[in-house]
Amino acid sequence: MASADESGSASADPSPPGAGEAPALTVAAVARRLGVAPATLRTWDRRYDLGPSAHSAGSHRRYTAEDVARLLVMRGLTLDGVAPSEAARVARESHVQADVDGLTTPATPRSAAPAERRDASVPVTPTLVVDAALRGDEAAVRRLLATPEPGGVLAWWTELVEPARQAIASRTVLARAGEDADALVVAAVLAGLRARTAPLQHAHVAGRRVVLLLAPPGEERPLVLHMLAAAFAEQSVDARIVAGRIEQNRLVEIATMTRPAAVVLVSVGEAPDLDVVAALAAAHPQVPQFVHVPHDAAAEHVPLDRTVHRSRSLPGLLHEVLAVSA
């Protein structure tokens, strides 16, 4: 019988399996079974010695039922936040029992199961988030990003969310309709921030003015605005994100109505439209404005003034705004 190649589905080895035995499977078949990328399996083989053990002359190495059972242990532990090296050690030392009947049945996506709480004592890494997002495992992504770490949302953002999104952005994938790894992360981040800030809403000090957060005209609102709003909420500061179309006259009207303690503009573009900053400074010179732009070329266009400041880092931005809004 013909043997399968790396991109095909499982087929029988030249010697058919005996009764009660499962056929040895290719990398592609096992990847479908576990719901992971074939590259992940090759990495686990190379780094952690969790590769296929069956081999026939003239064909690729194949995974036995016991191999797949160990990989299921590895996958389950990593999804629960265990470090890959430790998960691999447990998987190698486990006395696994192969599920022969279910071996060739594709794994049920974990997103179909109710989300479980993550063990807060187990560290979550950007790699875990990226792997879950690339698998399209919505429940795992939400579980991994469910609650910001004890260090606060800023540390959670800089150490977990940003690296994960940058890693996803660096990947080139062939996605099917409805598949978007970054969109899964964004949805999980927003859900985590809502859960984080909901108990803090009552802590806002009565009479304290709001802080307005916005993006320049023509730019999509960056996700970091939501992180900043949550970080201010942790300090009992009511921060609001200006959604919708931003125009000079409209921003001046909003500032007139809300009398904000500060206005924060965050741009991720190389040539942001900062005319709104100048317009607001002219109409409300008493309102402190903080402009956060990542590119030095864009910083040259910040209309610096007595109350207009450029913030060079997110921690610095938080401290500066808290100083004028407390």
Image: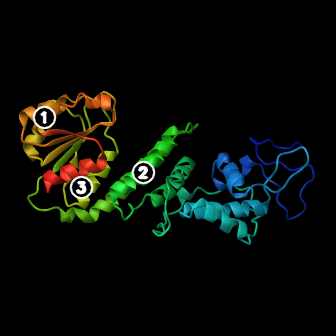
The numbered mark at residue 61 is none
Nearer the observer, 324 or 247: 324
Q: Which mark is residue 305?
A: 1
Which of these two is toward me, 203 or 7?
Answer: 203
Q: Residue at x 50, y 56 (%)?
A: 125
Q: Say whether disc 1 or disc 3 marks the residue closer to the N-terminus.
A: 3
Distance between the alpha carbons at the discs numbered 1 and 3: 24 Å
Q: Give the quarter of the figure containing the N terminus.
A: top right
Q: Please give left or right for residue 220 compared with residue 54 in the image.
A: left
What mark, if any, has residue 161 been given in the picture?
2
* Disc number for residue 232: 3
Left or right of residue 96, residue 13 in this image: right
> Could you give the CA–CA distance between mark 2 and mark 1, rounded to whole angstroms?
33 Å
Question: In which quarter of the view is residue 3 placed?
Answer: top right
Whether 308 is drawn above or below 134: the answer is: above
Q: Which mark is first along the chain, 1 or 2? A: 2
